[in-house]
Amino acid sequence: MTMKYLTLIACLLVSNTHSFSQVPITTTRCNNIRLLSSSSNDDGQSSAKTQEMRMEMSSLKGAKAISKLDINERTKRAMLAESVENRIFEITEVLEVLVKKNSGLLEGDAREEAVELAKQTKALQVQYDDLVSGRPSMLLDLEDERS
């Protein structure tokens, strides 16, 4: 996913320089989404594939808005989105391990941990959507404050 995302960002950057002939990015992204949905969907991969498809769809929806931003803004957003994406996949993996460890039955501390992980994932998904759609993002504001 990360390499695909970086490749798509590179395509956006290159398409705005007019150095190469333009290939419709939405076609490429749609093909990626079709490939994702047609790939094997065993239980170990289903959560990751769902997350990946969700992120691809968010990126696709925001591609036009992102292409209108200046290069520095796009670069910041791409780097932050990649970090957020990596964290979402880490949390998803931890959650899958927790569910398997408890044979799918989450009670007590395991349930509380799962709920907390789900809340973190949801908050990160919102941040990811903001970053890839061109909407204002708290993460960008924090990055600007640190600079």
Image: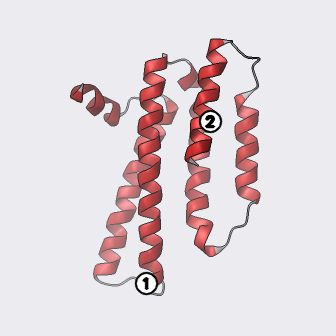
> Who's the residue at 62% across and 25% down the image?
12
Colour pattern of the rendering = secondary structure
Question: How much space separates mark 1 and mark 2, taking CA atoms?
Answer: 36 Å
Residue 36 sits in which quadrant? Answer: bottom right
| Tag of residue 35 | none
Mark 1 or mark 2: which comes first in sequence?
2
Counting every numbered tag in the picture gives: 2
> Dot 1, how many residues are within 10 Å of its Cα: few (below 14), some (14-19), or many (20+)?
few
The reply to whether callout 1 and callout 2 are in contact (CB within 8 Å) is no
Residue 74: where, in percent of width, then height?
48, 25
For label 1, the residue is 101
Residue at far left of view: 146
Residue 42: where, in percent of width, then height?
67, 73
Instruction: Please state if 96 lies on the left or on the right of 25 as rendered.
Output: left
Residue 147 sits in which quadrant? Answer: top left
| Tag of residue 7 | 2
